[in-house]
Every structure is written in C-alpha cells, then in structure tokens.
Image: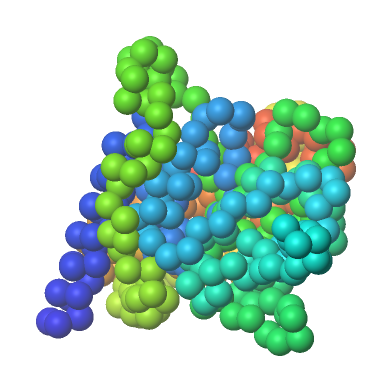
Amino acid sequence: MQGDSRLADWRARALRLEEQVNSVMVSQAYAVRRMLIAVFARGHVLLEGDVGVGKTTLLRAMARGLGGGYERLEGTVDLMPSDLAYHTYIDEDGKPRVEPGPVLRHGESLATFFFNEINRARPQVHSLLLRLMAERSMNAFNREHHFPHLLVFADRNRVEREETFELPAAARDRFFMEIGIAAPETREARRALMFDPKFHDADALIESVDKGLVDYTALNAFASELQNAISVSETLQNYALDLWQAMRDPAAAGIQLEDVDVNTLIAGGGSPRGMSMMIRAARVNAWLAERDMVVPEDIRAVFAETAGHRLFFNPIYELRRDEIIGRLLDAALARIAAP
C-alpha cells in the first residue's frame, strides 16, 4: 500500500512537470510526454528537428523542472575531447589558468548536459561522450569524476552537411530515445507562436516552470522502484519478442514495403540493449497512465522513439532512411498481432 502511495505521489509530480513544460511549448505534447518518459527511465535523448522549432526551449524547461546543474556545449569542428573537461586561459595578471570545463563545473550535481549540434563535433569527441553516457564518469585531473544524476541530451544539425560528422551506429544506439520535434501544423498554433508576445521571450517562459519540481537526486532510486513495480505478462513479453524479431528480419516476418527489398534492407541493429530500453519506456508509460502492468498500447506508444534509430540500413537504403523507417515501423506494428 505504501508503495502504491509513493508511485502516486511521484506520478502527480511528473504530471505537474509535464503540464508546466507544455505551457511553455506550443503543440508539442507528444514530444514532451516522451521526454518525460526518458527522464523517469533515466535515458539519454537525441532530439531531431529543423532549426528554430523549440528543441532548446523544451530541454531548458525540462532541466529547470528537474533542478541540479545544467550545462550546454556547442558542437564545432575544432572542438577537442579535453574541452569537455577543462579550459585554459590567461588571467588578468598574464598567468595561464586551468578551470573545470562544462562537464566538471558542477561536480556530482550535474543533472543535464546538452550537446548542441553534436554532428559538428569530431568522432574523438563522440567517443568521450559515449563513455560519459554509458558510465556517467570521466577521467580528468588524475582522478575519476562521477555524475550519478546525469542525463545527456543532444541534437543534430540536419540542414548543413559541410564540416559535419554523422554519429556512428554505436553512438546512436547509446541514446535511449530519438525524439522528433516538428513545427506546429495547425494555423492556431502557428498564430500563437507568431503573434503572442508570451512566446517571444524564451527566458521568461522557462522561468515560469517551478525550479526543482522533481527532485533529481532521488530519481535514480525511484526509477528503479518504478521498473520493479510495473509488471509485464508472459503474453506481452512474447509480443515484444516478436516485434524485436520482425525488426531484425522483416522479410521472415512477412513485412513488405513498396520500392524496398526487405531481404536486403537491414544491415544491423535491433540490439538487446535497445529492446530492453523499449520495455523500460513502456513501463514508465504504463505508470503515467495509472496502470500497474504494461499493455500493448504502452509498447506501441514508445516503439518508434526507442527502436527506430537502432535499425541500420544497407547503404543503398540509408540515404532514404527518413522515408523508409516510419513505414517499416508501422508495418511491423500492423503485422505482429497484439495480444
């Protein structure tokens, strides 16, 4: 009974955070919910979307609601791995100084790290970021630094291709979710963004979110408790396993796509880590909906964001990824019968 009460108390806080972030954003409820799921599943997120659609605003609003240290780093072609750990400069006395960089500045209280335009940074930087994401630690100044509460968020420049370095498969698989953020489609939402002065001051919008609404220092323990509290029946386990197999071998599952040879489509992916993350996300989705067990709708709700970026196509199809991946995921959900 006490556990149920604790789950309900945390759910109320989570939904309050979601409500406040939605008041900052316009017509982004889908993306906000998936960001919330990632936070409570303790997973890193890659944000996808065009320039100026509110990715940074969304992240800053969520980070304010969580509290803790927040850092942002801009991806550039000349960025070095050491730039994450420290920076050097000449002080006013003309002496060289070394100060902690963005990752080390807040110590263990670092809660949110935002890597803007991650594909502008070189692979050496990606490698260091991968360790930070996987182990939540970094070696610097002759000792190990730990960041137990850290979540990493990144976005990619999808417009300019010059001097960019696409993320390798291992880096993309490390992200818990890839969440797309698009410009609002409705005329009313676009009117609000264009003409309502409220949405012209991003800093004021972000400050309207209660700081530290959710205790970031307690999230790790609660996330583990949540995962143990939400059950997955054997029938639903089999459904998830069938979806996994369909992703790895769509031809054997009977999936057909127009203008695509599904026999040669998949080069790799659908990792065990990725599918376990899908279930973590489904459990959080069930909890937010006040259920104590996962149902097919929970898996379907997080399937695209947790599985899509973990499927890697043969080069002949990779250039058409944006056009194919959604069709493939929809076909898998349609083909595999839900219990």
**Most foreground residue, 294 or 169:** 169
**Most foreground residue, 208 or 11:** 208
126 w.r.t. 333: above or below: below
**Most foreground residue, 46 or 201:** 201
Q: Quadrant of residue 213?
A: bottom left
Horizontal side of residue 275 vs 93, given as left or right: left
Horizontal side of residue 52 vs 286, given as left or right: right
**Most foreground residue, 137 or 305:** 137
110 w.r.t. 161: above or below: below
- Quadrant occupied by the C terminus: bottom left
Instruction: Write the residue at 37% across / 42% down.
Output: 206
Residue 300 shows in the view: no
Q: Position of residue 204 (x, y in %)?
A: 35, 36
- Quadrant occupied by the N terminus: bottom left
Instruction: Write the residue at 74% across / 69% down.
Output: 98
Q: Quadrant of residue 80?
A: bottom right
Q: Position of residue 73 (x, y in %)?
A: 65, 52
Instruction: Looking at this view, name the residue that lies furthest to the front.
Output: 93
Horizontal side of residue 234 vs 112, given as left or right: left
Instruction: Write the residue at 48% across / 72% down.
Output: 109
Q: Position of residue 292 (x, y in %)?
A: 25, 69
Instruction: Write the residue at 46% across / 59% down.
Output: 38
Instruction: Looking at this view, name the residue that lies furthest to the bottom.
Output: 143
Q: Quadrant of residue 317?
A: top right
